[in-house]
Amino acid sequence: RDRHACPRAGDPPRLAQGASHVGREEERVEAGDDVERIILPGEALHLIQDNIRTLVTTQHGGLLSFGLFAALWTAASAMMVIIDTLNRAYGVQDGRPFWKVWGIALLLTIGLPVFMLVAMVLLVFGPQLGEWMAAQIGLGALFQVLWNVLRWLVILVFLTVALAPVYYCAPDVAHAWR
């Protein structure tokens, strides 16, 4: 019987068959192949397998550069949508030149994740960082207790520094400090 044919009534489910092979190393690939063969026609499966083999076995430095560029372009485009949305929320037309708006979008795209990443690292690894700083400074337990309170303030500052420029720089409005 053709492996690409639809299952008949009474046949065991192929996913269940594939799952039963997962424990054995030599049959793991076969289990994944069964799932792929159910979903894809034969020619498409061979085309995808050949492309994956080529990507894995050959070095493509340009492919990584293109991937980073495409990711940055996509994220900056999303930031452009946020800029447009904030301009609409303020009820203004963006009068800045295109290159300036894209520059702001790129800076916000790069800066926002950096500050948010630092805040998340402090959230997760804050106690260990406090222990390390206490050992370096030589203050011991007093610094650790103080750090466990202050790190929440530092996290809040980093999140504020990450988000404030979006609301300040993105819309084309003059903000008045109050």
Image (cartoon, rainbow, N blue to C red):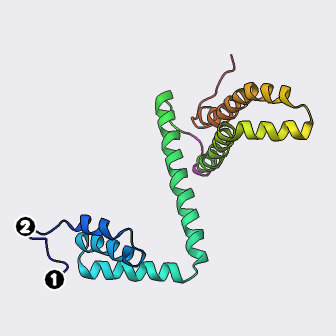
- Residue occupying image coordinates x 77% and y 40%: 129
Please tell me whether the stretch drawn in magenta is mainly helix, strand or loop.
loop
Viewer-side residue, 13 vs 117: 13
Say if the magenta span includes residue 98. yes
Hey, which residue is sitting farthest top in the picture? 178
The amino acid type of the residue labelled 2 equals: Ala
Q: Quadrant of the C terminus?
A: top right
Per the rendered image, the range of residues in magenta is 95-99
Query: What is the number of callouts on the image?
Result: 2
CA neighbours of label 2 inside 10 A, class few (<14), some (14 to 19), many (20+): few
- Is 47 left or right of 159, judged from the image as shown? left
Q: In the structure shown, which secondary structural element does the residue marked by tag 2 occupy?
A: loop
Specify which label sits upstream in the sequence, 1 or 2. 1
- Is 138 left or right of 12, judged from the image as shown? right
Q: Position of residue 83 (x, y in %)?
A: 53, 40
Q: Position of residue 140 (x, y in %)?
A: 87, 31
Q: Which residue is mark 1?
A: 2
- Residue occupying image coordinates x 62% and y 45%: 113
